[in-house]
Amino acid sequence: MIVNWKGDGLKVISVIDASSGKKVITGTVTLLPGHNIVKDTDWENMEKQDSLQLSIKSGRLVPIGKQAEKVIKENVVKIVEEEDEDGNISKKKKIEKKEKKITATEPILLKDMKAEEARQIVKDTYNLETLEAWRKDEGRDEIRAEIANQIDFVNRGGKDEE
């Protein structure tokens, strides 16, 4: 998944897996300003988070691909108090399914984009890992040249050649 972080600094997002009914942090993703690659499996977990959905709706985080509203089901753990016939109160966990609407994005790879769109995305990418990954996957000579130029630009600290 390609995402464009339009914020001023780094954005660190926890990858949370809630499939078991408990929310478990399985890692983090750090985004630099500009375009970044996020593993599809991480994105599937991240895009369900309310804070990430707010960033998408505000336009500060732009996932690249076809977007659509999607309803997901989440497990919500609630603590319920029960009283037995002797008047003893016990606490039990109860898992409920909750529906939530999110903006989901079908990912698109750089190599599958039209050349002009790919060039624009490369020019707005400052993450060297992302650029190196694209250089390995990209087969079009003109896009590979653009990637090489952007890598040089980033290595020069964002300064044009003199």
Image: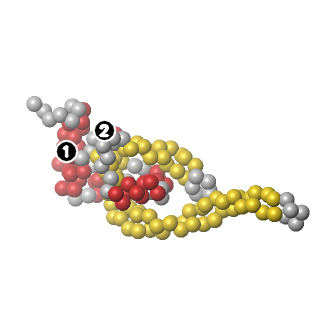
Res 44 visible: no
- Determine which quarter of the picture holds residue 117: bottom left
Res 92 seen here: yes
Count numbered badges in the picture.
2
* Kind of residue sitting beneath label 2: Leu
Q: Nearer the viewer, residue 153 or 101?
A: 101
Camera-nearest residue between 92 and 124: 92
Rendered image quadrant of residue 103: bottom left
Residue furthest front in the image: 87
User: What residue is disc 2 on?
Assistant: 128
Left/right of residue 117 with respect to residue 136 in the rendered view: left
Which quadrant, please, contains the C terminus?
Answer: top left
Residue 146: image tag? 1
Q: Secondary structure at mark 1?
A: helix
Look at 40% across and 57% down and name the residue there. Answer: 54
Q: Residue at x 18, y 56 (%)?
A: 116
* Image point (33%, 41%), residue name: 9
Q: Amino acid at mark 1?
A: Glu
Marked residue nearer the N-terminal end (2 or 1): 2
> Counting other residues with Cα less than 10 Å from the Cα at mark 2, is it few (<14), some (14-19), or many (20 or more)?
some
Q: Could you say which is closer to the camera, residue 65 or residue 54?
A: 54
